[in-house]
Amino acid sequence: MSNLSTPILSPRTVEVPPHPQWPILNTEETARMKARIRALLDAQNAVLVAHYYTDEALQALAEESGGCVADSLEMARFGTTTAARTLIVCGVRFMGETAKILNPEKRVLMPDLRATCSLDESCPVDAFSAFCDAHPDHAVVVYANTSAAVKARADWVVTSSIALPIIKHLTTQGQKILWAPDKHLGRYIERVTGADMLLWDGACIVHEEFKSVALERVRRLHPDAAVLVHPEAPDDIVDQADVVGSTTQLIRAVAELPNSEFIVATDAGIFWKMRQFAPHKTLIPAPTAGEGATCESCAHCPWMAMNALQNLEQVLRHGDQEILIDPVIRKRAVVPIQRMLNFAQASIGR
Ligand code: SF4
């Protein structure tokens, strides 16, 4: 049974930065900037690690330059396998921190260190530690979307692609779970696994914007479309899904399912990779407009949008925006992350 903890910090109170107003580049300017960035990457023995939610120009450049475009589990793993001395993480801060935790000997830079995540922000370490202390008989499982300090307090770190098997594994061992910070993902896991879970009260501001009544309408207009939903979305969206899964699992669904139309309820940045895998299929964004919509209802993470070619070039030139982590925190945080990676390797070969 869910037992939501006292709200610590409503995600709605997290300040969303204005989108950086970078000048729009034409094709030639983009090509020239990408060439300069590639030269800087080579000169600095650096590699790009980009998330599916970032701008498509960044995803394309990461692939073209021998880097990686992936979900947060694969981003974490990739950093440990590349010989590059510098990792440029295009995503949000917890992804850069995870890369640094796993690769302390490497330099980890990000285009903009202010790129955060409403889930991370909703879970300050002091309040979280007090929550853990109040429930010492629970295994502490945290989503990857948390700070290094919160990870350091956890027994397990999970991403959305590995959360279900890990919680099932813990449940078969008779463990009760303390889960943070995403209440929607926590509820979904709880419903699927029957696990005994205490849930933190955090949420993703992007996935919370999908509207269930409007989604029903779109489904009626496209009765043959498969509905793909990321489990950070609320229950009334998840309940309408044909496939619920991580970003990688949703991309795979577009490529593998026989449907020619898909309604997609996750960040719009994912469409670039979906089109790459299935160029002839029709992708329909799940609606975020309608009753209750806000100016943030664009299905695109404002913090992911802080990554651009322009500030990528700047960070390569100036070497600032570097992720640094207290060695004591790093030493603790690496344990639950490595536990997840070992579990993933043993259970699903990733
Ligand atoms: S899309 Fe949501 S979960 Fe992902 S980084 Fe943005 S706020 Fe965090």
Image (spheres, grey):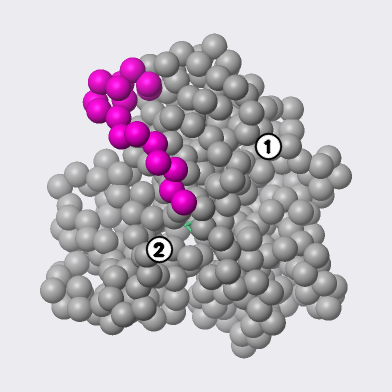
Q: Is 22 included in the stretch rendered in magenta?
A: yes
Residue at image position (83%, 78%) is 134
Residue at image position (56%, 31%) is 88
Kindly indicate the quadrant of the structure image that contains residue 301: bottom left
Q: Which residue is mark 2?
A: 296
Residue at image position (32%, 57%) is 253
Between marks 1 and 2 in the image, the one whose residue lies nearer the viewer: 2
Residue 274 placement, left or right of 202: left
Image disc number at residue 152: none
Image position of 218 with respect to 348: above or below: below
Kindly indicate the quadrant of the structure image that contains residue 245: bottom left
Which residue is more in the foreground, 289 or 211? 289
Kindly tell me whether residue 165 is visible in this rendering.
Answer: no
Q: Which residue is mark 1?
A: 323
Tag 2 secondary structure: loop
Position in image of residue 141 (x %, y %): 69, 65
Image position of 100 with respect to 281: above or below: above
Which residue is more in the foreground, 126 or 144? 126
Position in image of residue 205 (x %, y %): 48, 65
Residue at image position (22%, 60%) is 284
* Magenta residue span: 18-34
Kindly tell me whether residue 19 is visible in this rendering.
Answer: yes
